[in-house]
Amino acid sequence: MIRLEHISKNYITSQGTVTALQDIHLQVNAGEIYGIIGQSGAGKSTLIRCVNLLEKPSTGKVIVDNAELTALSPNALRAARRKIGMIFQHFNLLNSRTVYENIALPLELSGQNKQKIAATINPLLELTGLADKKNHFPVQLSGGQKQRVAIARALACKPKVLLSDEATSALDPETTNNILDLLKNIRDTLNLTILLITHEMAVIKACCDRVAILQHGIMIEENNVGQFFANPQTAIAKNFIVSSLKQTLPPVIAEQIIHQAQTNHHPILRLWFFGGAATQPIMAQLMNQFNLHINILQANVEYIKQHAMGIMILAINGDENKIAAGIQHLQQLGVQVEVLGYVPNDIIPFA
Amino acid sequence: MSPMILSLLLNATLETIYMVAIASLLAILVGLPLGTILYVTRKGNILEQAAANQMLSAIVNMTRSIPFIILMIAVIPFTRLLIGSSIGTNAAIVPLSLAAIPFLARVVENALLEVNKGLIEAATAMGATVWQIIMKVLIPEALPGIINGLTLTIISLIGYSAMAGAVGGGGLGDLAIRYGYQRFDVTMMLMTIAIMIVFVQAIQYFGDKIAKQLAHSRV
């Protein structure tokens, strides 16, 4: 449904040429929710704006619904844009218009009459749960409600594609989930194709089918979401996944932890699991094969489309060489092990 | 108060209203589009025309830097060309409009600058033409600011119209100078001042009210 071929974008500044995007290839299939994740400055915003040509790519082709947008006349491009809805981080609603009038705007722009507009908007108000807010002004709405209005507005011209530019980044976690549920719901009911950009792994986890990572304007990794979490290829992918899991040391440990090994101290480890390793009985192996004592301080394992991923912080006690051998064993199983530091033996009870 | 004074006051008041109303109307007709052009042709905006923008901006600044009393005299040849005379109420409208147009244009430009740029982006993404963006998004969103600016312009025009009176333009300023100043008629002076104050208060009141009503959406 969306195809980007060899998309590059360069900005010419007084300091020289800045490359925002470099040779991006992207294919989003019909009915798919495709997420692009990256840190700020990675080029996500530029990339999503290239899809409806709010940004003109320096090179490359943009093809949406079999039409090459980069080859269209200004008039034809405007017509094509009506079939590409877009929602924004800061909603971009008109303060001077009510909810109803905001949703009506794209229909007015395409020259539809009042009756036709009403016939389109009323079902959209139902779909987005805004029926009772119809005559409210944006300022009277919460962030989540504003984004619902923006979604309804984006759907008014019955687009085939919806672009979401950090649509949940200004919202609290619960509202974020509501909005993501709504996006999944409209994808299913309207058979929409959704391309979204975000810097939050939770968004990818909650609603995407496929994901790509953008870094310094380059797409460094692409996969379906299950595979991505099971088997991240790049360091930045792993970072994103880890940062999406809660993992803080208990205060009593955090206060006492030192970075050098000492006598009467034992190590605190952080284990990262991706995919297969999470299903192995590794705790039992450490205890039985290496004769180690283990105390789990924190654990967080999640399942994303059948793939387990998780993080665990544990205190480990036993013979020094056995600990080293145990760590090696874990690494062989594909678990990433990091020694966070050492704490005195007496603060953590072992069996 | 004699009927003669009353009729003088009434006439002068009507002349002032006439001058200010026509000049305001012209300021809206020319200043609103001019301010919009100043905005949309700015660098990075929807109809970027950097050179034209700088030229227009320079002209606007030039007009605004001339004190009204001097502008009034400087444009006399132009006024004569248009009206056929440099004296009288109609003649006063020419410099009044020339002063109000660039003033309102800047005010409109500033009101438009306050509009969130994301709205332009959103409208472009909806397939809006530049004209649609201006008429359906920019002007409606900037309207409360534009109304406030218009209020300011009209009040300035009331002050300017009194100055125009001093050089034969008629109106309340003319009355105040001829009777209040030159004939030491304190009553007449106070009456003209009172009428001016009522004018300004009324315009400010209604301007604020309309702007507030349009901005009902903003807390």
Image (cartoon, coloured by chain):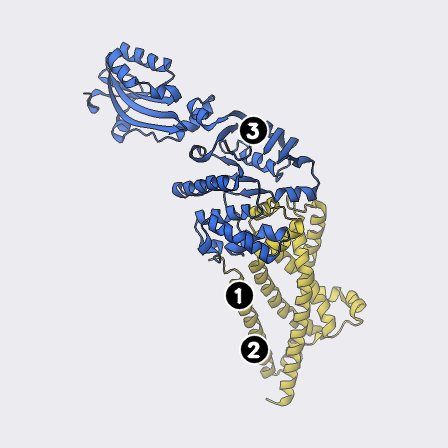
Residue situated in front as seen by the camera: B74 or A333: A333
Q: Amino acid at mark 2?
A: Ala
Local secondary structure at mark 3: loop
Q: CA distance from mark 2 to mark 1?
A: 21 Å
Quickly name the residue at label 1.
B208
**Badge 2 local density, few (<14 within 10 Å), some, or many (20+)?**
few
Q: Please rate how many residues cluster around mark 3, counting C-alpha atoms within 10 Å: few if below 14, some from 14 to 19, many from 20.
A: many
Tell which circle, 2 or 1, labels the residue nearer the N-terminal end: 2
Q: Residue A45: horizontal and vertical position, in percent?
A: 55, 36
- In the displayed image of the protein, which residue is found farthest to the bottom? B2
Q: Is residue B65 visible?
A: no
| Image spot of residue B208 (x, y percent) | 53, 65
Q: Nearer the viewer, mark 2 or mark 3?
A: 3
Q: Is residue A113 left or right of residue A201?
A: right
Quarter of the image for the N terminus of chain A: give it. top right
Residue B63 visible, this orientation: yes
Q: Chain B takes which shade in the image?
A: yellow
* A337 displayed left or right of A122: left
